[in-house]
Image (tube, grey):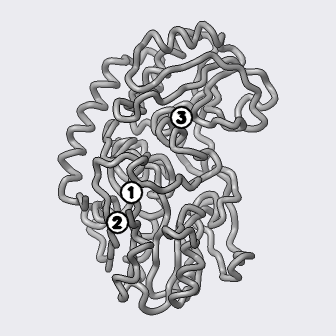
Amino acid sequence: MLFGIDRIEEEPKALSGRLALLSAPSGRTLKGESSIDFLKRTADLRLLLAPEHGVRGDLADGVPFESGVDAISGLPMMSMYRKGSYDMPEEAFDYFDTLVYDIQDVGARFYTFISTLKHAMRQCADHGKRLVVLDRPNPLGNLVEGCIRTPETESFVGFHDIPAIYGQTCGEFALMVKDEEKLDLDLTVIKCAGYTAGMTFEDWKRPWLMTSPAMPDIESVRLYAGLCLLEGTNVSEGRGTSAPFRLIGAPYIKAETFAKDFNAMELPGVFASPYWFTPTWSKHQGLLCGGIRIYVTDAAALRPLTVGVCLLDLLRRSYPDDFGLRQYTEQSTTSLPFISLLAGHRLFENNEWSLEEVLEMNRQGREVFEERRKKYVLY
């Protein structure tokens, strides 16, 4: 299987003129060469643009950073995750004619790389710059789950009105954004070869390259797509442990009982064992937490968002006096709880929310979006 970066030389015009590259550590060729080194060697690469975590992936989630020089390549680096802004600095447009995007995504709307891509698309359209998206497969395939994000929950973790799990490659997403936003943008998507949407990650026959510090392996990716909802609560999602989004817990959770109750829901594709852990950073740092370790037993049957919603329901029923929501702390003017921005709706703000209502809303959203995305399918 070849990704867009492996086929870029089949599209020589894509490398014409001065280039900027928006990438991350996951941007590598089949042979393991970084996209930065590859384009520096084969084209006129002038500038690096950095999403959340930086071009080298050395920054934690949610940490804004300023522009500078990439110490390894010697190229100027401009941040698209600065305090108060997710846009390219205006001076960036003096450096390039074509922006190349090469980042592995995880298939979840709240993973911020596609929000950065949309910001870049708008700016390139405004400044008359070309954009080339080097496509990569979606590790969740064409799975869609969740409601269409409502207008009032728009944020950087929900910058386009799509479900939480959207079933598109970054190239397909870019085509949809250009069309739906009516952008006057010179956009080229260099497709993958040997890829079909029904393939699983195992079919790629390529290793998983960490896309961020909390995405060390494919099991984390598969569970993140649903368990990220816990970031909006006072329950640890496993940050500060060796198993983010596989370990969940809090000081008030009784591990043995909670594991039994979770498994009693008989959710397809997952199993949990009781677990105790002490996060070294993030929520409940230094405190012993009871909780569960979740295992993916059947990736094809797994519906991550359903797992996440059912887990929220179990937590509020099991620990009504302890379980709670967190306010949004990202650089934003919104006063909505973070869970509303992650979920794309506001039902969770009312503690009496109905599990059946949420699941039905997500089902309807999936049906609507699956029809809407058909015109942008590349594989």
The residue tagged with tag 2: helix, strand or loop?
loop
Q: Which residue is mark 2?
A: 192
Give the camera-side residue of 224 and 51: 224
Label 1 packing within 10 angstroms: few (<14), some (14-19), many (20+): many
Residue type at numbered disc 2: Cys
Q: Does any portion of residue 266 appear in the rendered image?
A: yes
Q: CA distance from mark 3 to mark 2?
A: 38 Å
Q: Where does label 3 land, which residue?
A: 337
In the rendered image, which quarter is residue 324 located in? Answer: top right
Q: Are marks 2 and 1 in contact (CB under 8 Å)?
A: yes
Earlier-in-chain disc, 3 versus 2? 2
Q: Position of residue 258 (x, y in %)?
A: 58, 11
Determine whether, in the image, residue 204 is placed left or right of residue 333.
left
The residue beneath circle 1 is: 137
Horizontal arrangement in the rendering, residue 365 relative to residue 313 (left or right):
left
Identity of the amino acid at label 3?
Pro
Helix, strand or loop status at disc 3: loop
| Circle nearer the N terminus (2, 1) | 1
Q: Can residue 336 be spotted in the picture?
A: no
How far apart marks 2 and 1 lie (CA) works out to 7 Å
Category of crowding for the residue at label 3, using alpha-carbon neighbours closer than 10 angstroms: few (below 14), some (14–19), many (at least 20):
some
Residue 332 x, y percent position in the rendering: 57, 50
Q: Amino acid at mark 1?
A: Pro
Q: Left of 369 or right of it: where is 17? A: right
